[in-house]
Amino acid sequence: MGKRIAFFGPAGTYTEEAALRYDSGAELQAFPTIAAVGHAVSSGITEEGVVPIENSLEGSVTYTLDLLISQSGLAIWQEIVLPIDHYLMAKPGARTEDVQVIYSHPQALGQCRKFLERCFPQAQQMASLSTVAAVLDMKASAVPAAAIAPRRAAELHGAAIIAQSIQDYPNNVTRFVVLARTDHEPTGRDKTSICFSYDQDAPSLLFRALGEFARMGINLAKVESRPTKEVLGRYIFLIDCEGHRSDPNVAEALAGLQRQVSMLKVLGSYPRWGA
Amino acid sequence: MGKRIAFFGPAGTYTEEAALRYDSGAELQAFPTIAAVGHAVSSGITEEGVVPIENSLEGSVTYTLDLLISQSGLAIWQEIVLPIDHYLMAKPGARTEDVQVIYSHPQALGQCRKFLERCFPQAQQMASLSTVAAVLDMKASAVPAAAIAPRRAAELHGAAIIAQSIQDYPNNVTRFVVLARTDHEPTGRDKTSICFSYDQDAPSLLFRALGEFARMGINLAKVESRPTKEVLGRYIFLIDCEGHRSDPNVAEALAGLQRQVSMLKVLGSYPRWGA
C-alpha cells in the first residue's frame, strides 16, 4: 500500500493530475477545500497533501498562501510544476452548434475568454464552483451545454471532448506544493519559502529585508505581499529564495531578517522542480 | 447633466456604491467587465470609470492590475476606500429555517465561511458570476434559497434582508480607483502608482529598484508582483509610493528606476483617500 496523499479535489482536477505525476503509486484522497487538505496533513489523516500555489497567468492561489501563513504543523516538502490544458466538453452526441450555455470555474472562463468570444459569441457563461463541478452542471443542464475542464474530468464523467488547449495564452502552467509535517532535507539544489511581517507600516522596511539576502549573495525567486486581514495597507511578505535554510548563507540571512521583523515563519526548504 | 462615469456593474454592486460615494450627481453607466470599463474611458464613451483594485482580505483585484499594466490611454485619477458589508437576503416571506441553497460569488462565500458553517451548516453553497447575479439566481431558484450580496442589491431587486454584516472579518474594506484619460494634478497629499519589469529574471533586481526610493526618502505604500503571463517566475512589479510624479524627489527616483528596468509605466499620481 502506497503513501496516503490528500489533494484538493474532487477527482478529475488538475491537482489530482499533479498528485499522480508526483507519486502514481500513492493512495490519493480527495478533500473539498485547500484548508481541509492542510488539516488532513497536520492532523495525520494523510502523510502528505497536494495543493496549487501559483499559476503563470492568474498569479498566486491566495487560499494556499493564507493556509501556509496561518496554520502550524505544516511545511512545504516538494514543488510540482504542471502545464494546464483546458478542454471543452459536452454530452456524447451533442452538436457544437447547439451549445447555449458554457459552464466552468470563473478563472477557467477567464483563461479562455478570447476562444469563447471567437467560437461561442452567443453562448451564456455560467459559474461553477470548480472545473469538475462544471462537468456535472453541464450534464444536468436542461438546455444544450458545454463545460471547460481538465481532460481527466471528461474521462471520469463520460463527457465527449469538443476542443482541446482552448486557453488564450500558451504558457499556462501551475505550480503545486506537496505539504507535509516537516520540510525536506538538503539536496544541494533547494529553494526556501518564508513569510514575515512588521507591527508597523511595512513596505519601506522591505528594502532592508531584501538587503539581508543581497548581502549574502542569495538569489530571490519570488517576492509577494498578502494583506494581513487587519488593516488595509499592512502586509505579510512572502519570499522564495535559492538554497536550503540549513545552508550557512541562508541561515545567516534569516537570522538577520529575524532581528528586523515582528513575525518570521519558514514555510519550508525543498528541492527545486526540474533541477 | 453630470459627468458620465462607467462602473463595473451591474447596478447594485459595491462598485456602484463607491461610484455614488465619489460623485452622487454623475450619470452612472454599468459595464459588464473591468476591461469594458477601461475601454469606455480610453475611447471616450465616458469621462471616468470606477473599478475595484484591492480588498483588505482578498488582496488585489488582478483584472484591474492587468488592465492598468496593459492598456494605454488610461490613468488613475482618484482612489476611493469603502467598507464592505455583506447581507444575507431571500424572497420576501421566506423562512430562514427552510433555506437549502445559498448563492453568491465564490469570493463572498469565502468571506462569510464561518457564518455559513455556524448558521447554515446544511445549506448547499452555489457559485454565481457576481453578488448581484446571486440575487437573481436566488429569486429564480425552485428550492428555498438565499443570496449573499450588497444591501443595494436587495433594494434594487426586492429581496428581504435576513442578516447583516455577516462577513467573518470585521475589517473588510475595498479600495477602488477612478480611471480617466489623465492622472490628477498635484495636491500636496498625493500617491503615485507605477509598474515595471525586467527582461531577465527579476526579483533580485527589486532590491536595487527599492533602493532608488529609499535613497530619496520616499515612503512606499505597497509592493506587489504580477506574473508576466510569459514565463513562470518572471514578474511585473507594482509599487505605490507617497508623493506626486512631478515632486522633485519622486521624479528623480523614477528617473533612476528608468535606467535599471526594461519597462516602466506610471499608472498615475492622485490624491490620497482621506488625506
Image: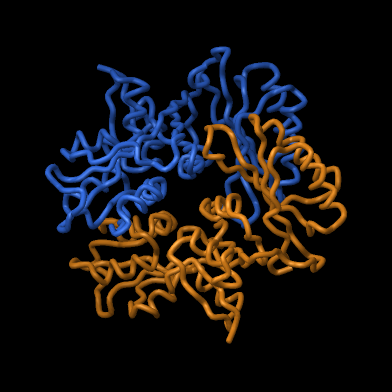
Chain colours: A blue, B orange
Q: Is residue A217 left or right of residue A36?
A: right
Question: In the figure, residue A84 lies in which quadrant?
Answer: top left
Residue A239 seen in the current view: yes
Percent x, y for residue A140?
Answer: 16, 52
Query: In this rendering, is residue A77 above or below B211?
Result: above
Question: In the figure, residue A12 lies in which quadrant?
Answer: top left
Q: What residue is at 30 percent from the left and 37 percent from the top?
A: A164
Q: Quadrant of the C terminus of chain B?
A: bottom right
Q: What residue is at 67 percent from the left and 22 percent from the top?
A: A250
Q: Quadrant of the N terminus of chain B?
A: bottom right
Query: In this rendering, is residue A173 above or below B147?
Result: above
Q: Check the image and name the residue furthest to the top.
A: A188
Question: In the figure, residue B184 lies in which quadrant?
Answer: bottom right
Q: What residue is at 35 percent from the left and 34 percent from the top?
A: A15
Q: A262 or B102: nearer the eye?
A: B102
Please state the total of marks drawn on the protein image: 0
